[in-house]
């Protein structure tokens, strides 16, 4: 029985990506909460309270008073059994927590709590409340929990369709009335396993989302520069027309006033010629910028391209696209070409699982070394 369950759990931990439509009552609940002016950033957390009695531990559902707001029902049940040392769960409606995650540019960690399930006590006590999981979730996710058999928790269980409990999911906002389910975990999981799965999800899905956002931001910047340069080119063209007109009028005036004397308008002519050169240069610059953006966009859609996210010791992040046939050494050459201060001898490593890409791997292609189609590497000083 246990071996079958472990196999099912591994299948549940496989990286998934599916879009889920939210029902109107969940979306409508968010609109009502916003209408009452709820402060989104001040809700949720951990509560210090007295130790639960044996009866409360054995009957957690009965201890939840009808006067407790539905948003606090999960925290009340959880803390009565396991105390207040747990991740920071926002005590709010699902859509409010999703909005917080979107504003903070973080993924959302969803936990559906089933108190009566036999695996729930050990999972909550040993995994959810472990210091490793608490620190990792608080630093990287917006956490939201609910009772799987009540109100929004029951609705989310209907939407996410867990095959077993304990059940956790990594959620991301999506366009329209939908959410993206990036990862879901079913069954008992150790603290190290949970952190490894969440770390991998952040790196793989976060890199894809970060790449898409970076491309969109780059497109906006290129478009803005292109418009500015086109405006400058237009103004330069108007200036050229004015200079031509003034030059023509000057020639006509000289002929009327001094028919014998040859006109001398060399300064105006030189100014006109310089303006023409400036117009050509600005126009060529605009075309070059537009061509560069098209090259970046085409490179992003190339199936043979490998996206590498490099994290530096000072917290700086750089993303670069390589061909899948490029060698690992090309990543080192790219880093060296940046000329960043304070970087001496170093090596590249990946985490979860930890792997070093050093001298022995220099001659391997990015595809053969497991870095294709995308990977996240840390620069470690030696």
Image (spheres, rainbow, N blue to C red):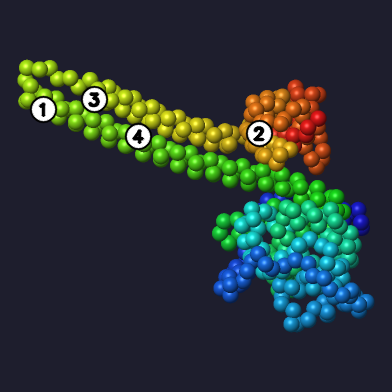
Per the model, the C-alpha gap separating discs 4 and 2 is 37 Å
Graded by Cα atoms within 10 Å as few (under 14), some (14 to 19) or many (20 or more), the crowding at tag 2 reads many
Q: Is residue 217 left or right of residue 59?
A: left
Please give the residue where the numbered disc 4 appears in the rendered image. 233
Dot placed on the residue nearer the N-terminal end, 4 or 2 = 4
User: Residue 44: which quarter of the image?
Assistant: bottom right
Q: Secondary structure at mark 3?
A: helix
Foreground residue among 240 and 190: 240
At a point 87% along the width and 67% down the height, the residue shown is: 82
Q: Secondary structure at mark 2?
A: strand
Let me know if residue 3 appears in the view.
yes
Please give the residue where the numbered disc 3 appears in the rendered image. 268
Count of marks placed on residues: 4
Please give the residue where the numbered disc 1 appears in the rendered image. 253
Foreground residue among 323 and 86: 86
Per the model, the C-alpha gap separating discs 1 and 4 is 30 Å
Dot placed on the residue nearer the N-terminal end, 4 or 3 = 4
Please give the residue where the numbered disc 2 appears in the rendered image. 306
Dot placed on the residue nearer the N-terminal end, 2 or 3 = 3
Foreground residue among 334 and 57: 334
Graded by Cα atoms within 10 Å as few (under 14), some (14 to 19) or many (20 or more), the crowding at tag 4 reads many
Graded by Cα atoms within 10 Å as few (under 14), some (14 to 19) or many (20 or more), the crowding at tag 1 reads few
């Amino acid at each position: 029985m246990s071996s079958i369950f472990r196999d099912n759990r591994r299948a549940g931990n496989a990286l998934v990506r599916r879009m889920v439509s939210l029902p109107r009552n969940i979306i409508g609940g968010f609109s009502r909460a916003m209408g009452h002016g709820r402060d989104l950033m001040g809700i949720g957390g951990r509560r210090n309270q007295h130790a639960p009695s044996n009866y409360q531990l054995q009957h957690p559902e009965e201890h939840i008073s009808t006067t407790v707001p539905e948003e606090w029902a999960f925290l009340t049940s959880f803390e009565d059994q396991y105390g207040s040392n747990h991740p920071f769960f926002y005590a709010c409606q699902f859509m409010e927590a999703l909005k917080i995650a979107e504003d903070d540019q973080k993924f959302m960690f969803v936990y559906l709590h089933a108190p009566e399930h036999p695996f729930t006590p050990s999972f909550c006590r040993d995994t959810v409340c472990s210091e490793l999981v608490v620190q990792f979730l608080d630093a990287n996710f917006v956490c939201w929990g609910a009772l799987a058999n009540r109100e929004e928790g029951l609705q989310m269980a209907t939407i996410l369709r867990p095959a077993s409990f304990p059940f956790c999911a990594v959620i991301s906002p999506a366009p329209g009335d939908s959410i993206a389910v990036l990862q879901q975990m079913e069954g008992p999981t150790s603290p190290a396993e949970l952190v490894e799965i969440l770390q991998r999800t952040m790196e793989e899905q976060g890199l894809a989302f970060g790449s898409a956002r970076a491309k969109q931001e780059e497109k906006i910047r290129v478009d803005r520069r292109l418009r500015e340069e086109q405006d400058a080119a237009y103004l330069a063209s108007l200036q050229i027309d004015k200079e031509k007109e003034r030059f023509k009028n000057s020639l006509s005036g000289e002929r009327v006033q001094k028919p014998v004397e040859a006109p001398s308008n060399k300064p105006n002519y030189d100014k006109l010629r310089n303006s023409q050169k400036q117009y050509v240069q600005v126009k060529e610059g605009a075309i070059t910028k537009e061509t560069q953006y098209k090259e970046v966009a085409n490179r992003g859609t190339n199936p043979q391209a490998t996206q590498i996210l490099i994290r530096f010791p000072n917290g700086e992040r750089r993303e670069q696209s390589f061909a899948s046939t490029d060698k690992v050494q090309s990543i080192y050459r790219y880093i060296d070409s940046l000329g960043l201060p304070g970087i001496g001898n170093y090596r590249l490593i990946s985490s979860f699982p930890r792997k070093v890409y050093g001298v022995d791997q220099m001659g391997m292609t990015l595809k053969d070394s497991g870095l294709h189609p995308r990977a996240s590497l840390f620069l470690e000083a030696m």
